[in-house]
């Protein structure tokens, strides 16, 4: 397949009740952030579409061709989905690039990670064990797991195929049926994943994909009585609203939300490694990453040297066309999102910040139509400023000097979010002490933004609740049922009175 700058617009359909068809709502288009050309046209799903998909999923999940499968048989389907993703890896990577404008090398990595996720949960599915617990009487005690039923997955636009795989794979491994609501503006990956799953032999109705508005499709999914769990990745404001709706029906959720992650550079850090880590941590994905290391706390002893090297390295970053193999930073997702990043940069200046590099759009005809913004570094900002407290979700870094470890830790933790943190040091005792004191879901030590599907991921504080990834996350999609299995020939005591 040949890919060009402006590929022809594709018509996409939703997968509802086992059928590919136009959803019942209004037609809308999605756009390539590089040049704003129209990428796809599709109809938004409605509340009725959600009801139909969920009812069908409920009956599909109880049929013998799904409910009757043993774990190793579900696992075989997941392995075939992983193989299907790999066999179309390049097309998927190109489509994801067109959907959200990430550089092609990044979308290739996301596709590879999605295939790895299905493979991992295939293996976990057939090796997961239930427990016989130590009995404390004349009975055998067991803790067994059963699928929750029909579950919902709501995903954001920044890394669609990876976010969707992380929810769909463990849910299918658990034996659930899944209804996916991708971000309205990036529906393609969920749709392609569903096609691959069908080809892999997943029965009709076990996976549905309904694109459309969060306030309609997402809301209806959450409120539907047959939806037994929702896995959500997105902003903290929407996550909070979702948590409230879920609480009303006592429905479990996982909420993977925003972040304002600190990266700590100690005086003994390997500065070349730390510069490369900070650069990648904030500017990869154009900063549109929940774990973006957007506050860099640099020890005063190395502050000037670190700053000098970081500015020089930032100036060499290749911002440009996401189709180019050389591009490191593509455009932001939309013009309106770029406007919100620009508003934060203006706010940063008003709050006393000094721009060291960036702070504007790149110039040149190749950038005119797209929503590009240059990597931007501030200094002189107070950790209490809004620029340092709020998630910008763009390529904007604040450099903050520190001297004393206790003040450093207090500043890192003085934030509503708690998703990730990085520490650059060569002293294991310092790393251990700081790492333990940080209020965060993930600590990266002398590395940043590296991932493994086998390691649980999630946040604390306003960055969310629950964990994704890791083999035990399959249990998040299962009910735990306890058995007490009597082994005594004698009747229970009361029957003797
Ligand atoms: P968003 O919250 O606006 O949307 C996320 C999803 O929720 C979309 O599918 C959207 O349509 C849906 N939605 C919106 N309103 C809804 C409602 N009322 N009910 C149900 N669903 C609704 O987030 P976004 O702008 O798409 O993504 C960016 C955000 O996602 C950032 O805050 C980022 O930090 C966060 N994020 C977090 C992680 C993580 O793992 N912690 C990963 C990626 C992105």
Image (spheres, rainbow, N blue to C red):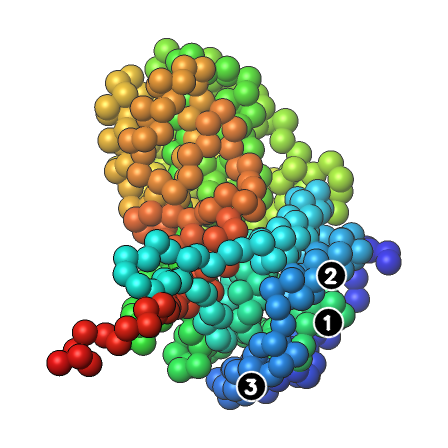
Residue 10 percent across, percent down from the top left: 75, 71
Q: Quadrant of the image for the N terminus?
A: bottom right
Pointers 1 and 3 in contact (CB under 8 A)?
A: no
User: Compared with residue 275, is residue 453 higher up or lower down, i.e. above or below?
Assistant: below
Quick one: label 2 or label 3, which is nearer the N terminus? Answer: 3
Q: Is residue 203 left or right of residue 298?
A: right
Q: Residue visible at 17% across and 79% down? A: 496
User: Compared with residue 460, is residue 87 higher up or lower down, i.e. above or below?
Assistant: below
Q: Is residue 290 left or right of residue 372?
A: left
- Residue at the spot of label 3: 59
Q: Residue visible at 61% across and 76% down? A: 68
The answer to which of 73 and 364 lies nearer the viewer is 73
**Measured Cα–Cα span from mark 2 to mark 3:** 24 Å
- The disc placed on residue 80 is 2
Q: Residue furthest left?
A: 497
Residue 399 percent across, percent down from the top left: 40, 28
Q: Is residue 375 left or right of residue 483?
A: right
Quick one: label 1 or label 2, which is nearer the N terminus? Answer: 2
Pointers 1 and 2 in contact (CB under 8 A)?
A: yes
Q: Quadrant of residue 481?
A: bottom left
Q: Residues within 10 Å of mark 3 (few under 14, many from 20)?
A: some
**Measured Cα–Cα span from mark 1 to mark 3:** 17 Å
Q: Residue furthest right?
A: 1
Which SS class for mark 3? helix
- The disc placed on residue 201 is 1
Residue 50 percent across, percent down from the top left: 52, 82
Q: Residues within 10 Å of mark 1 (few under 14, many from 20)?
A: some
């Amino acid at each position: 397949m040949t890919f060009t700058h402006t590929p022809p617009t594709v018509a996409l359909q939703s997968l509802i009740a086992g059928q590919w068809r136009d959803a019942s709502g209004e037609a809308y288009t999605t756009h390539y952030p590089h040049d704003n050309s129209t990428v796809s046209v599709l109809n938004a799903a409605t509340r009725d579409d959600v009801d139909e998909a969920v009812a069908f999923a409920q009956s599909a999940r109880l049929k013998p061709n799904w409910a009757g499968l043993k774990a190793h048989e579900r696992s075989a389907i997941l392995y075939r989905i992983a193989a299907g993703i790999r066999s179309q890896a390049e097309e998927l990577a190109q489509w994801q690039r067109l959907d959200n404008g990430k550089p092609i090398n990044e979308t290739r990595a996301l596709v590879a990670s999605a295939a790895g996720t299905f493979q991992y949960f295939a293996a976990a599915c057939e090796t997961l064990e239930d427990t016989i617990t130590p009995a404390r009487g004349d009975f055998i005690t067991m803790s067994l797991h059963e699928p929750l039923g029909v579950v919902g997955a709501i995903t954001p636009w920044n890394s669609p195929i990876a976010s969707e795989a992380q929810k769909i794979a463990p849910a299918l491994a658990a034996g659930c049926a899944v209804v996916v609501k991708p971000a309205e503006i990036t529906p393609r990956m969920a749709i392609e994943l569903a096609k691959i799953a069908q080809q892999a032999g997943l029965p009709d109705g076990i996976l549905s994909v309904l694109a459309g508005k969060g306030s309609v499709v997402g809301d209806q999914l959450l409120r539907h009585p047959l939806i037994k769990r929702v896995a959500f990745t997105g902003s903290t404001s929407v996550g909070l609203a979702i948590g409230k709706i879920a609480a009303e029906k006592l429905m479990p959720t996982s909420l993977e939300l925003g972040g304002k992650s600190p990266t700590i550079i100690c005086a003994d850090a390997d500065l070349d490694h730390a510069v490369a880590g900070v650069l990648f941590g904030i500017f990869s994905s154009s900063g549109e990453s929940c774990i973006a290391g957007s506050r860099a706390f640099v020890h005063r002893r190395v502050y000037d040297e670190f700053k000098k090297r970081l500015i020089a390295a930032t100036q060499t970053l290749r911002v440009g066309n996401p189709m180019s193999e050389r591009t490191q930073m593509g455009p932001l997702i939309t013009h309106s999102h770029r406007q919100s990043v620009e508003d934060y940069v203006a706010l940063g200046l008003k709050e006393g910040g000094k721009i060291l590099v960036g702070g504007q759009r790149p110039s040149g005809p190749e950038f005119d139509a797209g929503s590009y913004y240059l990597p931007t570094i501030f200094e002189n900002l107070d950790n209490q400023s809004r620029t340092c407290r709020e998630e910008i979700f763009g390529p904007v870094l604040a450099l903050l000097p520190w001297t004393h470890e206790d003040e450093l830790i207090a500043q890192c933790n003085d934030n509503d979010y708690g998703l990730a943190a990085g520490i650059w040091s060569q002293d294991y005792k310092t790393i251990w002490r700081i790492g333990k004191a940080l209020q965060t879901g993930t600590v990266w030590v002398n590395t940043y933004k590296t991932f493994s599907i086998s390691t649980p991921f999630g946040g604390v504080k306003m960055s969310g609740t629950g964990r994704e990834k890791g083999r035990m996350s399959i249990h998040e999609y299962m009910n735990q049922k306890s058995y007490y299995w009597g082994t005594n020939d004698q009747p229970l005591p009361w029957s003797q009175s």
